[in-house]
Image (cartoon, rainbow, N blue to C red):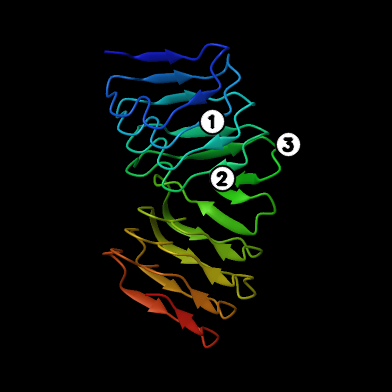
Amino acid sequence: NLETMVCSSAVSIIKAGAFKGCSSLKEADFSECTISTIGYESFAGCTSLTSVKLQETLSDIGVRAFEGTAVKTLELGKNVNSIGKDLFLNNKVFEGFTVIDKNKEYSSVDGVLYNKKGTEIIIFPAAKTGAFEVPQNVEVIGAKAFKNSNASELIFAEDAALRYIGDSAFEGAAIEAVTIPAGVTRLGNAVFKNAAKLAKVTFSEGLTYIGA
């Protein structure tokens, strides 16, 4: 019945699935070790996990590393340069990221994770609800960016810079309506897969490709 995991200074890698399914774990503390990698599904299924403290030495976080946890926030240090998809899959309480200014790959605004330049939305937290105003300078909505999210609507500026929406971007999302900006020329595969509440999509004249 492990409830707290405190990483020692000698640990540098948490291997894939290391704590998978440890439902009693509530806290994972990496603040005292030189960890560089949190592997694939390392904490997947840790349904009681609410607190994760990362060390600035961390660079890689694997796919579905915190799937099905109850973590609400995550701070990314300056060296994080790779984040796997579906990081918080099946976590409905995740409120958002904060990113250290010195990080060269990522940034965050109101909990939403972007690339450093703010031109790509990478992860939209599932706990954020209501309408979301997409920043004018966003050019890409990344693959699975809004997967299972609870935003009901996306609002774009008239001069939105958006050009591309990635694979499964709104898969399983609660979005109800969206108007694709005129600058978008391509939609990836399965963009609106299982988006059961989606009632209306308005496509622009500039759209030339819709994926399978």
Give me the residue at 45% from left, 48% from top. 85
Q: Amino acid at mark 1?
A: Thr
For the point 52% across and 88% down, which residue is it? 205
Q: Quadrant of residue 144?
A: bottom left
The label nearer to you, 3 versus 2, is 3
Residue at the bottom extreme, as displayed: 205
Per the image, label 2 sits on a secondary structure element best described as loop
Is 123 positioned to the left or the right of 192 in the image?
Answer: right
Quickly name the residue at label 3.
102
Mark number displayed over residue 110: 2
What quarter of the picture does the C terminus occupy? bottom left
C-alpha gap between disc 2 and disc 1: 26 Å
Q: Circle 3: is it few (<14), some (14-19), or many (20+) Cα within 10 Å?
A: few
Q: Mark 3 or mark 2, which has the lower sequence index? A: 3
For label 2, the crowd category at 10 Å Cα-Cα, with few meaning under 14, some 14 to 19 and many 20 or more, is few
Work out how far the residue at label 3 is from the one at label 1, CA to CA, in angstroms: 19 Å
Q: What whole-number distance in Å separates the C-alpha atoms at marks 3 and 2?
A: 18 Å
* Label 1 crowd (10 A; few <14 / some 14-19 / many >=20): many
Sooner in the amino-acid sequence: mark 2 or mark 1: 1
Q: Position of residue 67 (x, y in %)?
A: 36, 38
User: Mark 1 — residue?
Assistant: 37
Of badges 3 and 1, the one in the foreground is: 1
Could you say whether the residue bearing mark 1 is in a helix, strand or loop? strand
Classify 26 as above or below 200: above
**Image vertical order of residue 103 relative to residue 115, above or below:** above
Q: Is residue 184 above or below residue 94?
A: below
Residue 152 x %, y %: 38, 60
Q: Is residue 79 left or right of residue 184?
A: right
Question: What residue is shown at x 46% (from left), y 70% (from top)?
Answer: 188
> Are the two marked residues, 3 and 2, in contact with CB atoms closer than 8 angstroms?
no
